Image (tube, grey):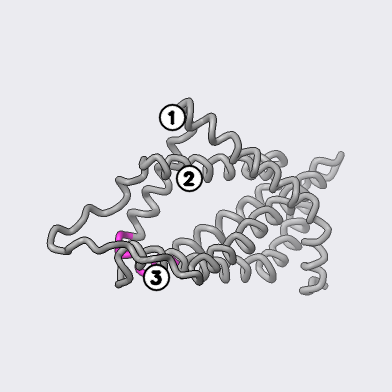
């Protein structure tokens, strides 16, 4: 019978594959530099398009509930699909690398100001205010996000890689095996990983709101 203990044990057993996923993620991050430097637009188009669409949907007011729902729903669905993509053998490892690449591209292009267009134009009726200092609790929330979201992503991809390894053995690529492997991973996901992503989404929402207040001079964004 599947239990919390068995789900936790499954995650521990796949920890080293999670480390492999983390290394692939870091490799993707490192690749983002040359991609941005040499302006490979075909590789940059999707992540930049996606982040602009998400930010436009959230809106310049950064409503807490909308920010939270976007972060939580996007992360929980995407990371589950990365785990389940083990049925396609090579896809989990590829997604670890591509996710690192996409995040690296967004960060680097954001520093260049290429994402400035996602911000709403200033309201001429509102006088600009000097930015306030960022409170320490905002940085603490950012650390909570790093401690929960990235490991959840890495271990989920590790679970997908482990499923791919088992299915790639001779005679093991059957619907029955796919269903059994996905079921035990899904239980671990809902029991352990999803609550971690929920806590991460709350912390990230608080951090985003804190940064927005600081940019607006300490008032409501």
Q: In the drawing, does residue 13 fall left or right of residue 72?
A: right
Structural distance between the alpha carbons of marks 1 and 2: 15 Å
Relative to 162, is 44 above or below?
above
Total marks placed: 3
The spot of residue 193 in percent (x, y) is 66, 65
Q: Is residue 116 magenta?
A: no
Q: How far is the residue under mark 2 from the one under mark 3?
A: 22 Å
Q: Secondary structure beneath disc 3?
A: helix
Depth check, mark 2 against mark 3: the one in front is 2
Quadrant in which residue 11 is drawn: bottom right
Compared across the picture, whether 107 is left or right of 151 comes to: left
Q: Which mark is residue 188?
A: none
Q: How packed is label 1: few (under 14 Cα within 10 Å), some, or many (20 or more)?
A: few
For the point 30% across and 72% down, which residue is it? 219
Say which quadrant the C terminus sits in.
bottom left
Q: Is residue 64 above or below residue 110?
A: below
Residue to which mark 3 is pinned: 64
Give the quadrant of the N terminus.
bottom right
Residue, disc 2: 107
């Amino acid at each position: 019978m599947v239990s919390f203990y068995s789900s936790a044990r499954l995650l521990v057993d796949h920890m080293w594959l999670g480390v492999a996923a983390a290394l692939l993620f870091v490799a993707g991050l490192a690749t983002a530099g040359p991609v941005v430097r040499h302006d490979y637009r075909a590789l940059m188009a999707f992540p930049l398009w996606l982040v602009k669409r998400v930010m436009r949907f959230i809106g310049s007011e950064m409503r807490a509930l909308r920010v939270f729902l976007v972060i939580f729903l996007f992360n929980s669905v995407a990371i589950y699909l990365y785990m389940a993509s083990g049925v396609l053998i090579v896809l989990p490892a590829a997604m670890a690398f591509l996710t690192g690449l996409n995040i690296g591209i967004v960060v680097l292009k954001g520093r260049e100001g290429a994402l400035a267009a996602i911000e709403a134009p200033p309201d001429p009726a509102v006088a600009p205010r000097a930015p306030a200092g960022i409170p320490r609790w905002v940085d603490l929330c950012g650390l909570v996000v790093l401690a929960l979201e990235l490991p959840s992503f890495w271990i989920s991809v590790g679970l997908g890689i482990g499923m791919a390894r088992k299915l790639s053995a001779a005679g093991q690529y059957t619907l029955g095996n796919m269903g059994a492997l996905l079921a035990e991973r899904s239980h671990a996901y809902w029991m352990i990983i999803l609550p971690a992503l929920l806590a991460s989404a709350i912390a990230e929402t608080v951090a985003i709101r804190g940064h927005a207040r600081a940019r607006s001079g300490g008032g409501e964004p």
